[in-house]
Amino acid sequence: MSEAVIEEGVPEPAVRWAPARIEDGPLVAGQGRFLDDMDPLPGTLVAAVVRSTQPHARLRSVDLSRARSYPGVAAVVGPDEVRAALRPFPLSTGTAMPYYPTGVDKVRFVGEPIAVVVATDRFTAEDAAELVRVDYEPLDVVVGARAALAPGAPLLHEEAGSNVATDRTFRFGPVQDAFAAAERDGGHVVEGEYDFPRYSSVPMECYSVIANWQRTDSGPGVEAWANFHGPFTMVPVMAGALGLPTSAVRLHVPADIGGSFGIKAGIYPYVVLMALASKHSGTPVRWTEDRVEHLLASSSGADRVMRFAAAVTASGEVTALRVDLVDNVGAYLRPPEPSTLYRCYGNITGPYRIAAVEIRARAVVTNSMPTGLNRGFGGQQLYFGLERLMDAVADATGLDVVEVRRRNLVEAFPYETPTGGCYDSGDYAAALDLAVRSADLGELRERQAAARAEGVHYGIGVGLVVDPSGTNIGYVGLATPAEQRRPGRDKSGSTEHVRISVDVQGIVTVLLGSVPQGQGHATVARQVAADRLGLPVEQVRVVVDMDTATTPWTVTSGSYSSRFAPLVTSAVVQAADRIAATLRAAASVMLDVPADELRLVDGTVAHPSGPSVLFRHAAGVVHWDPASLPPGTSARLYEEAAFAPRETSAATRDDRINSSLCYGFVAEIVAVRIDPDTLEIAIDRVSSVHDAGTVLNQQLLDGQVHGALVHALGGAAYEEFTYAPSGQPTSATFLDYLCPTSAETGYDLRTDHVVSPSPLTPLGAKGCGEGSSMSFPVAFANAVADALAPSGVGITRLPLHGEVLHQLLEKNEKENPPWR
């Protein structure tokens, strides 16, 4: 078993101190630099987008003439211009479902762009946009995953011949034998069908783009600014749509982004659309999304319909798992989808020793906003089904919900899952036990008994999740059958690049390509670099604004899937250690001692016997007197490192893949009280225990846990993008799309952590940004199910609130009248 320790026994930290966040001062002082604050190009005009009012319709005609003649309008771009100038975005699969930044032949969801008006200001652009006349031919509508799969369902993309964008089946181990044995030997076959809602993590700052089409001696190009935190993977996609080489697309991302949580990580069709608008207007073009546009047409996590079945022995051991996943990706399979289906492929069995697995993974298109990444994407959906199923296993076997989980936990590490995931370290039992102690589970059971005696619904729920971090992008290749994946064209990797330099005064600059949106990347990168170089943090500066022309990057770079702690900090360590080696060599000249006997400490390069030189003086030798350096020493203080772990290789021919580098763990216990009259759900207590490997900064870890819990509460109890049967959105304002506020987070929260350092990263760190966003929704659902168990009501979907509970209780009473 790998080393894991409870908080009071944490070993010597990998970094010496945890300074406070350096990002907050400018933000709280109103000095942030968000994209809408910036004006990088003179003569920039403003755009407004004309959007579809129909969920599914053929475009008979789009009349732009009145808008084009409106005073102050510089250009109007419509479907004809888009079709003539742009190619469909390259997709992750070969499905015949072409996706442009506007509808060209049809519109397929309410809010889909149809045209762009460029004018002197936003008011003029909006007024002119109202003059665009669209003649629609309404078509039948498909709402929801089940409707998309129904025989004879209206087709969104006729050339595809189906609403199924991808459909793959995988089998590992003796699944059929395990289910037969469960039925034959006194075990159980436990099944369940579950629905996970479509919701978003609504950021404070909406989408924003500035684009400039340029004509140079080497040909056309685009320079763009966007608050886009997944830029690198998407640069080739955008370049392909524009018909330009990747080198001709230059993208800037500002240092400050007002939240994203994945919503700004998928393809930004508006970068391409505004580039085309700039080409037609002959000027730079700016567009900033308003809140209604964002709720109507930006992005959300995929809603999922799923069936789970477990083969269970008489003693409660789960021996095999069948999983059928259907993701509703909206009107288009927008890159990087179908990522949500496969992001948790390697950890499909969660924290449990399940030797045999069968998976069917499908994505379907419907007349709704296209989906993308949302905090915990893939894990939210997976664990809602898996952990509801584990409660059903407990019911079938008569075991306590904690005990049935404990009996199935992975015990020895590293552990390889049937699908190819390799859990690097952990002590799941220790974390679960700590969560139970922290929750004071015995006292909660007493509260439950007392509440039920008073006629109050009270429930306790458990959720355990394996938290993947350091995504291996190769998992997206699983959407393509192995025989169709071209040899030598595989995809893999979790690479992150970092550049560190030292100036003549000994000031260290760390250049990141991780594109943060408030997580504290600069704070931790500064902390790690200072520790490796023996410097006070004040002598290190970190640059996080990004420019694809100057920032070191690879297609996997960016801020998604909790990559920073395991990957970016590892690259910082590598680059800093190379700088340190050069400085030791320089100091050895000054001190006349061997370089390998020197250490960097307290702003000096020192020998254990006492002699030392200042860090900046050693750096000065490299800058001012390079000829004095020992033979073979590089005369530079400028190092770039790429951390590219070999453990994240491409999918095998039998479709196994380690879909993430590191795997953390979360154990969560939630207690809820439900008012018997109003059915209002009140959270009584939450115990949340995380294992994210080495803790680099406790303040930031706590912030990630607390933030993820609030996001999860939104999806569990409030947030859902809904559509009427007609395809019209019914939650496109904050009157209907409800978000949690501080008033809903006043419950008794108890957090703690276990430390099992990862052997795969230099600091032993794993990611921690998404854990509770995956564990809390199902722990909350399990608590509500436990509260309502005496009433005979089952919980199979989210969100859960008073109106939903009223409908469930009413339906149950009709189906099971008390006089029966």
Image (cartoon, rainbow, N blue to C red):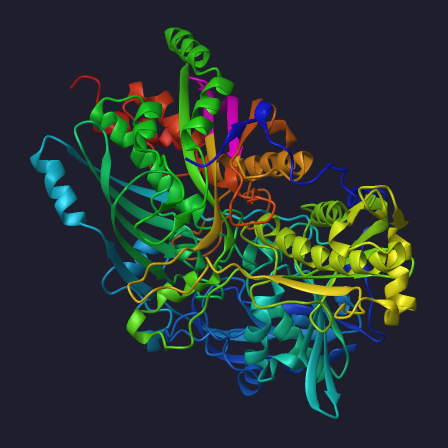
Q: How many marks?
A: 0
Residue stretch in magenta: 668-690
Q: Give how far across and how far down residue 54 sits, in percent.
A: 48, 65
Tell me if 692 is positioned left or right of 701 in this view. left
Q: At x 44% / y 23%, what residue is drawn? A: 433
Residue 732: image x %, image y %?
55, 51
Q: Is residue 348 left or right of residue 204?
A: left
Is residue 674 covered in magenta?
yes
Residue at 45% in and 26% down:
669
- The C terminus: image quadrant: top left
- Report the predominant secondary structure element of the magenta stretch: strand
User: Is-magenta flag for residue 521?
Assistant: no
Residue extending furthest bottom? 217
| Depth order, front residue of 50/606 | 606
Look at the picture and state if 553 lies above or below 197: below
- Note whether residue 681 is visible: yes
